[in-house]
Image (cartoon, helix red, strand yellow):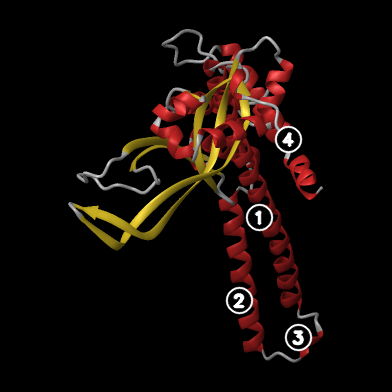
Amino acid sequence: MGFLGHFARRRHADATVLAPDRLDAAIEFVVDRVSPRLRLARNYKERLGPAIERFVVHARDQVGLLPPAREATSEAWVADADLRAFFAAPEEMALVLSRCPAVQEFFRDNPGANSACGLLGMSVTTRQVFGTELHGEVVQHDVAQQTVSFADHRINVIAADEASLREVLVRALGEQVLIEALAKIDAAQFRLKQLRDERSMLASQLRILQSRSGITGALFSDAEHDESLSAAKTELEARNRELRAAGGGSGTLDRQLDRLAELIADPHRAVQLELRTVRLNRMNVVVAEGSDEPCATVTYVHITAGTAKPRTGAIALLSIPRASVRKVESRVEEAARTLA
């Protein structure tokens, strides 16, 4: 079922505390996913539970930032400034919907469904350009302008309705946070192994220097030997300090559990959603506040996911009528027909 799949729904409209059985199941899922040995840590359920509850509140708030689903029809495109900013024409929107495998698969697997709700993902690019601008009756050329463009449209997440899709997105946020937590814990464990190996090597070097058994011992003066011995001790002490700071001593499992709880309770490091608004004209050029130029206020949610290699983009919810999805050639079929 996955992280948060055990408690995606609230017990009632105003609930903020998770049902104990669902919380317990989620804790066990997280521990199984990260390391079953964490069960050996002291009071692991009591220490991990509050972090998961804080995350659920955060995830619901984040998903709540998404505006209501927009109707993905040609008529809606004409009236909806957001859709006009996302898609150059209603035909482009219809083509995107029709070419998304997830959309096609949903309607194929649910022949009785008249509509679905999907998460539209897009790249969003802001550029500085030079264009023309009308001031009164005078057209000015080479005016510095900013454009916002949306491209690379895709729908990979889909559900029967908006409420179901929002639940899916809460679970997806949980999975992303868990992926990031695993990556950070793995990196910490790798660094811990490196420090232990370095400490072992330095300890061996120190023993050799102390015994003066190496051939170079016959070539060093006492002063040089003392200097090398002091440097080796200093390096070894530094590695020991790093190991203690990294949790290389006693209580390693407790440190890992605390780190996991910290990462889950602070999910904005893994995923950030931000509601943005911008005034755009029909060419997706940003219109300054106070300008008389015709424009519309466009709203979208900007997403940043990942820490090692962050990905950014824009997302929106679309209500997709079956009638808006048509059978189209795949890009491979289209290319083959064109070449023929």
Residue 237: x and y, percent? Answer: 60, 64
State whether residue 200 is above or below residue 232.
above
Give the image quarter of residue 161.
Answer: top right
Along the viewing direction, whichever of 118 and 217 lies nearer the viewer: 118
Distance Cα–Cα, label 1 vs label 4: 50 Å
- Kindly indicate whether the residue at mark 3 contacts the one at mark 1 (C-beta within 8 angstroms): no
Residue 291 visible here: yes
Which residue was labeled with disc 1? 191
Which residue was labeled with disc 2? 230
Which residue was labeled with disc 4? 329
Which residue was labeled with disc 3? 217
Along the viewing direction, whichever of 265 and 340 lies nearer the viewer: 340
Characterize the local packing of mark 2: few (<14), some (14-19) or many (20 or more) Cα atoms within 10 angstroms: some
Instruction: Report the quarter where the N terminus lies.
Output: top right
Q: Secondary structure at mark 4?
A: loop
Three-letter amino acid code at the position of disc 3: Gly
* Residue drawn at the location 52% of the way across and 37% of the way down: 262
- Give whichever of discs 2 and 1 has the lower sequence position: 1
- Kindly indicate whether the residue at mark 1 contacts the one at mark 2 (C-beta within 8 angstroms): no
147 left or right, relative to 123: left
Residue 270: x and y, percent? Answer: 53, 41
* Residue drawn at the location 61% of the way across and 76% of the way down: 231
- Of the residues tagged 1 and 3, which is closer to the observer? 1
- Kindly indicate whether the residue at mark 4 contacts the one at mark 1 (C-beta within 8 angstroms): no
Distance Cα–Cα, label 2 vs label 1: 25 Å
313 left or right, relative to 34: left
Three-letter amino acid code at the position of disc 1: Arg
